[in-house]
Image (spheres, rainbow, N blue to C red):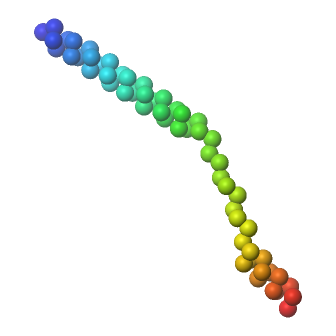
Amino acid sequence: MATYITVGIASIIVVGLVVLLSLTTLSKGYSYKHSVDPLPEDDKEDDKEEDRKNQ
């Protein structure tokens, strides 16, 4: 009977630890500041606009 109690307590501790680590990981993921690189200049578009102005 004592074995069942020991295994039950150990299982509850392991489950609690997994939940705690999962919540910590989620919290760090949501607090991460994402950044977006600026779009590169498109030379083809500039050339087309210049051609229209020159016509």
Quadrant (top left/top right/bottom left/bottom right) for the N terminus:
top left
At which x and y percent is residue 27? 52, 32
34 on left or right of 4: right
Outermost residue, top side: 2
**The one of 27 and 42 positioned closer to us in this rendering:** 42
**Looking at the picture, does residue 23 appear above or below residue 47?**
above
> In the rendered view, does 25 fall on the left or right side of 39?
left
Q: Is residue 45 left or right of residue 13?
A: right
Residue in the picture at 21% in, 16% down: 7
Q: Which residue sits furthest right?
A: 54
Q: Position of residue 30 (x, y in %)?
A: 55, 38
Extreme-bottom residue of the structure: 55
The residue nearer to you, when weighing 40 against 29, is 40
Image vertical order of residue 28 relative to residue 11, above or below: below
Above or below residue 29? Residue 49 is below
Identify which residue is drawn at 59% across, 39% down: 32
Name the spot of residue 23 as percent of width and height, x first: 46, 30
Q: Residue 12's quadrant in the figure?
A: top left
Residue 10, position as x, y percentages in the image = 27, 17
Number of labels in the image equals 0
Quadrant of the rendering where the C terminus is positioned? bottom right
**Residue at horizontal 78%, vertical 80%?**
47
Q: Nearer the viewer, residue 4 or 39?
A: 39
Q: Residue at x 65, y 52 (%)?
A: 36
